[in-house]
Amino acid sequence: MNGDGIPRRGLMLVLSSPSGAGKTTISRLLLEADPGLTLSVSVTTRPKRPDEVDRRDYSFLDSAAFEKMRAAGDLLEHAKVFGNDYGTPRAPVEKALAEGLDVLFDIDWQGARQLKGKAPKDVVSIFVLPPSTGELHARLRRRAQDSDDVVAQRMKRAPDEIAHWNEFDYVVVNRDIQESVASVRSILTAERLRRQRQVGLPVFVKGLSEGL
Ligand code: 5GP
């Protein structure tokens, strides 16, 4: 539903970025500000970080459990990132969309590409860039949850990730977190108002014409 009660088709909002560009913080603030948006919680074989909560940030699985989900077709998309497996469980996404919610995905470019291939009309993709390489490095170090090796590995991968910027519908340079959140919210507002997504418009407009 729109704010004005017209039935609307849910959308899939994909946020991607190199690790450390601020995407996770943007996602958290977006979710706090928008009750119509729900997060797709991924499954991963990566070890849990100290401040992460199982099934809130990720569902942490071993390789066998991940492979079982993949083989059963229970993942909408999946990819290997930094040597670990990540995937999007299908059922919660389908349930949320059916309930009229929009779904937010914090996934990499490989996942974004797969989702866009499967649901081109429903996916809106945003790429978040850091303002500079120096800032990206500083943010990764500030996170202080990963070992120096992991930080170095993530810095090394950043150019490969950034190389995919031009596959996305929108690009936001994250200079200021509040500004970036405001930009993403504007995108979401506009995309929700797309005529094709407002599937209740014919009935609404018919009512208007009849009332004239
Ligand atoms: P991190 O280990 O820092 O949480 O995530 C590493 C990268 O994997 C990030 O770019 C994140 O967006 C991506 N990622 C997280 N979950 C998924 C997923 O389900 N699918 C894909 N393709 N990428 C994911």
Image (spheres, grey):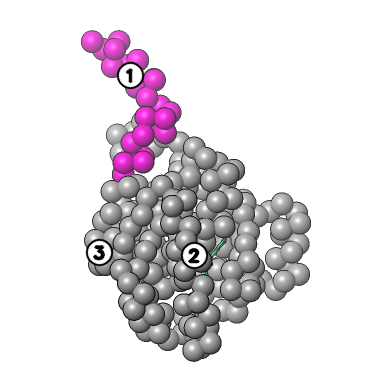
**Location of residue 33 by image quarter:** bottom left
Residue of label 1 = 205
Classify mark 3: helix, strand or loop: helix
All told, the count of numbered labels is 3
The N terminus lies in quadrant: top left
**Residue type, mark 2 in image:** Glu
Residue of label 2 = 161
Tell me the crowding category of disc 3: few under 14, some 14 to 19, or many 20 or more residues within 10 angstroms, Cα based: few
Give the CA separation, mark 3 to mark 2: 24 Å
Q: Which residues are magenta?
A: 189-212
Tell me where residue 124 appears, x and y as whole percent: 43, 46
Tell me where residue 148 appears, x and y as whole percent: 49, 89
Give the CA separation, mark 1 to mark 3: 37 Å
Residue of label 3 = 178
Q: Is residue 84 left or right of residue 149?
A: right
* Magenta residues, dominant SS class: helix
Classify mark 1: helix, strand or loop: helix
Tell me the crowding category of disc 2: few under 14, some 14 to 19, or many 20 or more residues within 10 angstroms, Cα based: some
Image: 73 above or below 46: above
**Residue type, mark 3 in image:** Gln
Q: Does the rendering let one see residue 29?
A: no
Foreground tag (1 vs 3): 3
Q: Is residue 151 left or right of residue 178?
A: right
